[in-house]
Amino acid sequence: MRIVRTASCICTLALLLTACAGIVARADAAPSASAGELKDTAGKAPTTATLAAGDPGGSLTGTISDVPVGDAKVGLTLGDVANQVGQNKIGINFTWTLITGFLVMFMQAGFAMVESGLCRVKNANHTYMMNFLVYACGLFAYWIIGFAIQMGGAAGNGNLGGLQPLASEHALSLFGTNWGIFGQSGMFLAGHTYDVGVMVIFLFQMVFMDTALTIVTGAAAERWKFLTFAVSSVLMGAFTYPLFANWAWGGGWLAQMGTNLGLGKGYCDFAGSGVVHAVGGVTALAVALIIGPRIGKFNRDGSSNAIIGHDISAVLIGCFILAFGWFGFNPGSTLGASGAGCLRIGSVAVNTMLAGCTGTFGALFYMWILKGKPDASMSANGLLAGLVAITAPSGFVNPTGSAIIGFVAGILVCLSVSFIENTLKVDDPVGAISVHGACGLWGVLSVGLFADGTSNYGGSWNGVTGSVTGLFYGDSSQLVAQLVGIATLVGFVFSFSFVLNWVLDIFLGQRVSAETEVAGLDLPEMGQLGYPEFVFKPEPDVLLAAERVAVA
Amino acid sequence: MAATKAQGRAFTLFMGGLTAAAAGIAFFSSGSGKAALVLGVAVVAYSFFRFLKIKPLEGKAALGEQPAIQKLVGVLLALGGWAVVLYGLHLTASVSGRMTTSVIGLAVTLIGVLFVLPSAANKNAIWKA
């Protein structure tokens, strides 16, 4: 009996040992088999001679032979393949982000055409030149300090390789929690921020910043002293824009409202209805208030005169350039096309198109029904209004939501233009305050209403797990976060811009002389007419009378 | 008068000073960084002095005097409303409470921006003359 029991124990032990050995063997076999497969695949790769014969079908180009080998003695390993997969992901995201950034850069041309087209011919060169120089002013200011303030503490974006050199955010401790105020890394892109990922995010964020700056030139067109415009733009690119952008996108306190206060996912602004357009819009309002209306815009009884732009074709073509650039603005804001929910780029692009379309209809219907004509410039502003409004929610809403947001924006821009001109008596030659300010704020608000909770950018947003969800889909706290963002834009950003430009008015003077304004800014300010061979049509009598009074 | 060589020189000074000041901040830990910051701020200040000096050459703009006190009140209202919104976030933890304080604060801000400041800007507007 004892012999049997002992034999049983030995057999059981032997079986266990055999089983364990089998498991270990299988575990060992896995990499061996894969390594074998790699070797096998490498052996089947087309030879140099085969490739030399040409590959018209494209089936031979791009094989295992193109994967770099870490150690030539060992040959291709799983590690080499995995590294290449990581490089490919980041490479795809870099390419996507850079190309969309290039599209956004081209929007400067669209802005230049829209703004100049809506101004009189005697100011064409000046308006074009403002839109041209704002690019250099903004870029330089952003490089020396603005980028560091905005993105200096924005490390952690996995789509672009982590951006670890940008890991210094100055925080303020209030009520027991830390709130990000401004970033501190990246001035001059020097030192450890001389990094491939940092360069990509710099380019992308820079062109966004420049879009905000160029909005202001429209509202102050036909009377803004060129020198003051240049100084004001440099300061906006260095301080005003980067500060709010840090709070929203650089890990600052608005973005932290989700983690610190439980307000939804914090302030959410996918591509910048608030950060870019509302910042530009409220600054435009601040400058327009200080600089005053153009000569002849308002009559003694407060009624306004229409001062017609010189080139509606430039306006409409400029709008299409802007709409094209917007495909960089919104889909590009995923900062990648591979991983972390980036495949939603198609949805973001369609939302962008739809809102632009319904925005056009909103403005067109409003003007046609109430004014009797399908006004071209307001239809153009309707398109832009829809695009501005969908910029913040484009990554969080569905196509139906985006269509509604765009349509509301199209009507809102008409109402806002009328309110600003007829009630506030503020002169905005191109409607920039309405298009970018009012509709930008509407876009920020609409995130808190229409975000449908289906987006999933890596499982969280602003450090809060889950999808951005608005009031209509069950999360009212997101709406509060958006309201705080709006209050910050109107309360802080506007005030900051107003005081800054007020100081500039004291030292430099914001407005050209009455003589210069009457003559047109092209010759006195730029030294050259925009269209030297044009024969100027005399101004309408009402404007001529106002000009005589102003000069006197 | 419009654009002049003096304006170009002052703007160049401003850009140079700002760049030096930024470099000073970027490399503040070093002695040359501190020197660059001081130099940069001084050059920016001097450029503003130059701006002020050449300002009268521009000629009279078609712009009435805007009352400074009223403008200041408008800005303070705008900032005050924003402060109400921020304070409200810590006043209560309920979503409806925070929404209420946010709306109240926003309303105060809008009064400053849409009523007080435009009124100040248009108080002595030339089109009224």
Image: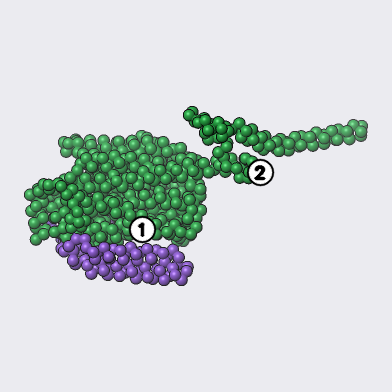
Q: Residue at x 29, y 44 (%)?
A: A110
The residue nearer to you, when weighing B1 against A461, is B1
The residue nearer to you, when weighing A336 against A12, is A336
Chain for numbered disc 1 = A
Chain for numbered disc 2 = A
Q: CA distance from mark 2 to mark 1?
A: 50 Å
Q: Secondary structure at mark 2?
A: loop
Chain B colour in the picture? purple
Q: Which mark is residue A73?
A: 2
Q: Which chain is green?
A: A
Residue A60 is situated, as x and y percent measured from the top left of the image, at: 53, 31
**Which residue has dot 1 on it?**
A141
Residue A515 is situated, as x and y percent measured from the top left of the image, at: 13, 59
In this orientation, does residue A518 appear?
Answer: yes
A61 is higher (above) or lower (below) than A250: above
Residue B80: image quadrant is bottom left
